[in-house]
Amino acid sequence: MDTGLTQAKKQLGDEMLLRVDLENRCQSMTEEMAFRKSMLEEEVKEARQRYESRLVEVDSGRKEEYEYKLTQALTDMRAQNEEQIKMYKDNMESTYVAKLDDLRRLAEMNGASANMSREELRESSLRMESLSTQLAAMQKEGKRKRVDVEEQEASSSVSIAHSASATGPICINEIDTDGKFICLHNTGEEDQAMVGYEMVKTIGNAAATYKFTPKYVLKAGQKVTEVAKRTTAYNTALEEQDEEDDNGVEASEEAHFHLQEDPRTAKRGCSIM
């Protein structure tokens, strides 16, 4: 648009220079015609003087003929001069009007183009502001959704595995899926003294031991629930994605319950693994 406007300004300047040049030429031609007219009048005056001087020498009967011819010649010369002046004037006026119309149309086109460019620039600015607002909202929404997904992944990535085995009358009846407690059951027909028995909970390489009191007796067919302590290990992995930091938390827990009899006591106990 700036290039077109510059060219239009340059063309307008050239047309103005041409207009001044044409006006100068018109003025020069007018002055030239006035000069020629004065010269012609001078020549006519001289011719008249020569004619009048000759009239003295010619017969008075031919005086009217000479006057008629002189008048006719002057009339023809005047008509030719007027026609030529009129032709020059019409040509200059038509050229001037055509150039002026071209400049007016060019100015209108440049003005319309400038207005259109300003309108397009304003609309582009409004679109950019709208897109920036939408982008900020989408980034905020995306960040919130990533946080929700991370929380869901963190809450759903916890896995608990149990393994247990038993021999003898004491067996494992129930293990909490969250690893919070364990239920023991005396399947024998006699009461079972729990002295010498110990329950071991192993998570990874760590182990916790629970021993029953010497006076504790698990009656025949009776069930008892013991609460197991819980240890959770968290491993955090840092992952970079889409040039933003996303933190993921993975939790894992594996519990192994082991109920065994103290080797210093009788071999009547049970082993739970």
Image (cartoon, rainbow, N blue to C red):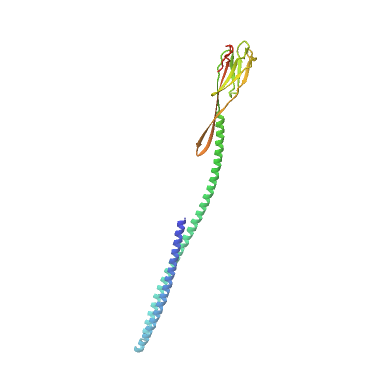
Q: Which sits in the foreground, 56 or 156?
A: 156
Image coordinates for residue 228, horizontal then vertical, percent? 60, 22
Q: Which sits in the foreground, 117 or 271?
A: 271
Image coordinates for residue 69, horizontal then vertical, percent? 37, 82
Image coordinates for residue 91, horizontal then vertical, percent? 42, 68
Taking the view exactly as shown, the residue that stands out farthest to the top is 189
Q: Is 64 on the left-hand or right-hand side of 191?
A: left
258, above or below 149, in the image: above
Q: In the rendered image, which quarter is residue 55 located in?
A: bottom left
89, above or below 259, in the image: below
The residue at 62%/20% (across/down) is: 226
Q: Which sits in the foreground, 105 or 3?
A: 3
Taking the view exactly as shown, the residue that stands out farthest to the front is 264
The residue at 56%/31% (across/down) is: 154
Q: In the rendered image, which quarter is residue 47 located in?
A: bottom left
Q: Which sits in the foreground, 59 or 238?
A: 238
Image coordinates for residue 173, horizontal then vertical, percent? 59, 17
Count of number-bearing discs: 0
Taking the view exactly as shown, the residue that stands out farthest to the right is 215
Q: Is 263 on the left-hand or right-hand side of 15?
A: right
246, above or below 18, in the image: above
The residue at 44%/61% (across/down) is: 10
Taking the view exactly as shown, the residue that stands out farthest to the left is 58
Viewport quadrant of the C terminus: top right
171, above or below 54, in the image: above
